[in-house]
Image: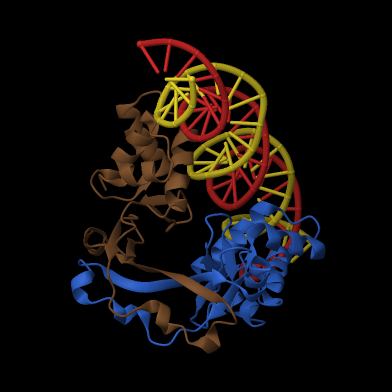
Chain colours: A brown, B blue, C red, D yellow
DNA sequence: ATCCTACGATGGACTCAGTCCAAGTCAAGA
DNA sequence: TCTTGACTTGGACTGAGTCCATCGTAGGAT
């Protein structure tokens, strides 16, 4: 994702220090951060960055297709920088941990035309839920 | 769902007028209402019912497995009374309309053991996104 | 190298969805 | 009919996110 900034410049983005810092945070170890977590990490690098800017930047990255928004728990949305590798999510229903997974088959084709009701279906999101190894152990002990 | 009240009584629920009214609202035409919409409809039948009670009752119905919570847009959660018929959702990304659909195949088995990372996977949610017929037409005209 | 200006950043107020809680009410068993 | 603990109430509170008037600055023009 180090060429992310190049792609953005190519799209007419002004490269402000704030945007650079947000990109840098998302470029770190690939976890699924909330907007506030992104803001906290960005603030370590650029203390005056505002929450509004982080929200703006994340929103722009999402609409450019560089980052995917996932809301797995009805609470804060999380931002997944792994947008260029199609994948789905596996979520622990106890601790909320998220892992990227790659199911076999292609879920989009699983929806027969008769079940499309005239919709132009373009994407599908799949969320598997269960207990992660740690929580399974905690609950059974 | 008219026997819902019976099932609830069997589980030790007190049958208050508020709970009866919430059940009645969910029993109506099968749409995916938000908590506030449920409250508005309930208030037509029982004007003094409070928002807190609607939230409580919906939460209880969800944990009893009588109703499913769906959050398709990161905004208000919606409540789907169709809990006893396994299904997935098709959402219009422009107007937010939701339809129940029944894909072929069983998505749970599409996750190979090697992709489960030790999780005990129990459920899967699939959300198809696209444009409904109305919005497709609006956008192309 | 300097200037200009439109795009972007700021932060504080605001909205929206949902939760919490102390006090009052009432369903249903005795 | 009485009693009691489960249920309801409404208002305050929280968390996540948006809005907006004002200020700052990236980067093209000179």
Q: Position of residue A113 (x, y in %)?
A: 51, 87
Q: Is residue A48 above or below residue D11?
A: above
Total number of numbered discs in the rendering = 0
Q: Quadrant of the C terminus of chain B?
A: bottom right
Q: Is residue C30 above or below residue C19?
A: below
Residue for point 41% across, 78% down: A108
Lateral position of residue D26 relative to residue B45, left or right: left
Q: Position of residue A117 (x, y in %)?
A: 59, 82
Quarter holding residue A109: bottom left
Q: Quadrant of the N terminus of chain B?
A: bottom right
Q: Is residue A18 above or below residue C23?
A: above
Residue for point 44% across, 73% down: B126
Quarter holding residue A128: bottom left
Along the line of sight, the residue nearer the viewer: B141 or A78: B141
Q: Position of residue D16 (x, y in %)?
A: 49, 44
Q: Is residue B127 visible?
A: no
Lateral position of residue A47 relative to residue B26, left or right: left
Along the line of sight, the residue nearer the viewer: A83 or A3: A3
Along the line of sight, the residue nearer the viewer: D15 or B23: D15
Residue for point 37% across, 52% down: A66
Q: Position of residue A62 (x, y in %)?
A: 44, 51
């Amino acid at each position: 994702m180090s060429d992310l900034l190049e792609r953005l410049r190519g799209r007419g983005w002004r490269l402000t220090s704030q945007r650079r810092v947000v990109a840098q945070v998302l470029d770190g170890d690939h976890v699924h951060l909330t907007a506030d977590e992104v803001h906290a990490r960005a603030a370590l690098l650029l203390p005056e960055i505002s929450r509004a800017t982080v929200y703006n930047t994340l929103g722009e990255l999402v609409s450019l297709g560089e980052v995917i928004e996932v809301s797995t728990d009805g609470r804060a949305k999380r931002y997944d920088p792994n947008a260029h590798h199609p994948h789905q999510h596996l979520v622990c229903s106890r601790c909320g941990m998220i892992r990227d997974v790659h199911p076999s088959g292609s879920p989009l084709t699983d929806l027969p035309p008769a079940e499309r009701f005239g919709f132009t279906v373009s994407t599908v999101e799949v969320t598997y839920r269960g207990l992660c190894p740690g929580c399974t152990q905690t609950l059974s002990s």
